[in-house]
Image: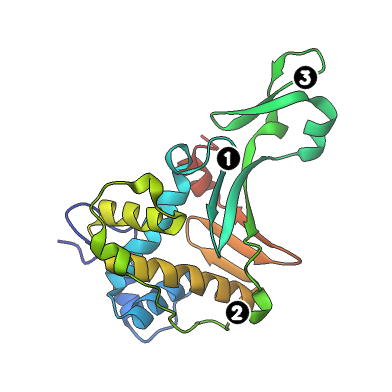
Amino acid sequence: MSGTTISDKSQTMFPASSIQSLQSEKTPSSFSAQIIREMSKMTGHSIEKAAGVMDGFWDYVSNHRTNWRKDTHCLQIPKFGTFTLKPRSKTFIKKQKIGKMKFLKSQFIYRDKEGKWTRSEQTRARINFSLSPSVDMASLPSFPPPFDPLSTHWTEKWSGKGQSRLSSKRKISVSIHEKTGIPLKEVHALLNYLLQATLSAIKSNDTVNFVKRGTFKKGRTVSFKTVPAFERKFGLTQ
């Protein structure tokens, strides 16, 4: 059995060699790997479980048909940020469309000035990111941040029913738990540290890359640029 195995349900995308490298004293080359190491160190859970939770988080983000709001095309994660689908060219849309837009497969379609539903390359969707208004980058600790454990009492009472009534973070935790088999209490702790560490890394380094997913960049605002492989998984490109 591979060293990357989390359970019979799921495996991480990290090969055994990467897991072994993270367990060594060498500084990882990517920020995603550094964050995995800190997730494990700060929570006391294994590298394999930390990697599994990171994979599970990005798998959840990529499944927009199931996990994103259909009306606003967004995934909001309180005290972290919001991922939103936007057309690639807002200027083009403003000049050409009348009435409402709709999202169909990988594109936004709109009624043109003749009243016909239309699509073009400029209306292809892209993933936009914005920080939660409650996040004050200046007040965040530098990377790696201390572990600020949240209450896990709810994980002990979770019966597997009523997921629609859970908060956004708890929904993500349950999804990762169900797909990986990692105990829910551990997932919840690892996920919260992942989000804390990502924000602190952005503050400390301006650019934070997640392998095969994308890169957060800090300027006047924080943005997220996806890589082609993630867009294909998301369904935005073929």
- Which image quadrant is residue 24 in? bottom left
Query: How much space separates mark 3 and mark 1, taking CA atoms?
Result: 21 Å
Establish if 9 lies above or below 3: above
Secondary structure category for the residue under label 2: loop
Looking at the rendered image, the disc whose residue lies closer to the viewer, 3 or 1, is 1
Q: Is residue 92 shown left or right of residue 233?
A: right
How far from the left and from the top, in percent, is residue 208? 57, 68
Q: Mark 3 points at which residue?
A: 112
Quadrant in which the N terminus appears: bottom left
How far from the left and from the top, in percent, is residue 140? 60, 79
Q: Which amino acid does label 2 sit on?
A: Leu
Query: How much space separates mark 2 and mark 1, taking CA atoms?
Result: 29 Å
Query: How much space separates mark 2 and mark 3, taking CA atoms?
Result: 46 Å
**Residue at 44% of width from left, 77% of height from top?**
28
Crowding near the residue tagged with mark 1, few <14, some 14–19, many ≥20 C-alpha atoms within 10 Å: some
Secondary structure category for the residue under label 1: loop
How far from the left and from the top, in percent, is residue 216? 60, 63
